[in-house]
Image (tube, rainbow, N blue to C red):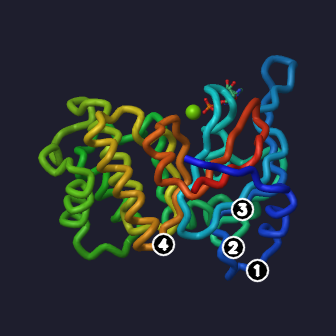
């Protein structure tokens, strides 16, 4: 992979952030910071992060363990509210939305694959996917659609299994199928191939690539997986909560 550093990513991203809602930027963050009080010490986890992801791109977020990747993805996905800064998804400023509006916005627009999968333990693999389709309310055959989604991640044969009886890689694939439910325009995934063997890893990577290239889905992936780098349009690096610059893959 060859890569070049953007001249001034921060300035470019500020312009992206203020652009009109119909701009081609699907994910924009401006001056996002996140800190926590640990005892009586303030701990800064994200420090003035600005970035943007063009619609239909696959962007990776890389960096050492503890650099803030999961926190940043959670902020961009509307799961955590940042201490400072603004986030826009598809032109809508989610950092300004009331909680209830944000929940339904996320449900319709952002498919999120959690690092720890977050499956419902009392529901089967198929039901874990079905429940999202039902909440979205626009699938006329949620049962059938859930099975089709499991088939896409090559897990149809485990549709009726409960999470406790699935391997880590199988749970990861249920989490991915669930994130694809309802064709969200934005998919965010936290180390989505970490538990997968190489065959399933490739299947997931080609699936994400197809969604981006054929359906225009915007895909933001936290990963260490060098195979994903080959399909990425750009890569952002975090270190100690600071963005080190965006690399353009190519
Ligand atoms: P990564 O995904 O890159 O491994 P994380 O975003 O999970 O990093 O965490 C970055 C840092 O923030 C870690 O040092 C972690 O301990 C700290 N951190 C994350 N969440 C909290 C929290 N709720 N309270 C205090 N510190 C936190
Ligand atoms: Mg993480």
Residues under labels 1 and 3: Cα distance?
12 Å
Q: Nearer the viewer, mark 4 or mark 2?
A: 4
Residues under labels 4 and 3: Cα distance?
17 Å
Q: Tell me, for residue 91, which label it has, or none.
A: 2
The vertical placement of 240 against 222, above or below, is above
Callout 3 crowding tier (Cα within 10 Å): few <14, some 14–19, many ≥20: many
Pointer 4 residue: 216
Ligand 1 is in which quadrant of the figure? Answer: top right
> Residue visible at 42% across and 73% down?
215
Q: Tell me, for residue 87, which label it has, or none.
A: none
Q: Are marks 2 and 1 in contact (CB under 8 Å)?
A: yes
Q: For this rendering, which residue is in front, 165 or 4?
A: 4
Q: Tell me, for residue 20, which label it has, or none.
A: 1
* Disc 1 C-beta below 8 A from ligand 1: no
Q: Position of residue 95 (x, y in %)?
A: 74, 59
Q: Are marks 2 and 3 in contact (CB under 8 Å)?
A: no
> Residue visible at 38% across and 64% down?
210
Q: Indicate the secondary structure of the residue bearing disc 2.
A: loop
Q: Indicate the secondary structure of the residue bearing disc 4.
A: loop
Q: Are marks 1 and 4 in contact (CB under 8 Å)?
A: no
> Residue visible at 61% across and 39% down?
62
């Amino acid at each position: 992979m060859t890569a070049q550093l953007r001249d001034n990513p921060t300035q470019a991203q500020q312009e992206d952030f203020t652009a009109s809602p119909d701009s081609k930027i699907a994910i924009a963050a401006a001056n996002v910071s996140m800190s926590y009080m640990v005892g009586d010490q303030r701990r800064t986890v994200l420090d003035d992060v600005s970035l943007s992801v063009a619609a239909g791109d696959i962007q990776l977020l890389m960096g050492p363990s503890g650099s803030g990747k999961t926190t940043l993805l959670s902020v961009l996905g509307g799961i955590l509210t940042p201490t400072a800064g603004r986030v826009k998804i598809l032109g809508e400023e989610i950092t300004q939305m009331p909680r209830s509006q944000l929940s339904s916005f996320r449900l319709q627009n952002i498919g999120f694959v959690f690092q720890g999968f977050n499956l419902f333990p009392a529901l089967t693999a198929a039901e874990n996917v079905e429940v999202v389709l039902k909440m979205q309310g626009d699938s006329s055959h949620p049962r059938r659609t859930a099975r089709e989604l499991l088939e896409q991640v090559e897990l149809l044969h485990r549709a009726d299994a409960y999470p406790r009886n699935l391997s880590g890689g199988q749970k990861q694939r249920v989490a991915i199928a669930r994130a694809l439910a309802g064709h969200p325009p934005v998919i965010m995934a936290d180390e989505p191939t970490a538990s997968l063997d190489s065959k399933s890893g490739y299947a997931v990577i080609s699936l994400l690539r197809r969604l981006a290239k054929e359906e225009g889905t915007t895909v933001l992936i936290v990963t260490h997986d060098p195979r994903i780098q080959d399909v990425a349009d750009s890569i952002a690096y975090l270190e100690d909560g600071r963005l080190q610059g965006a690399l353009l893959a190519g």
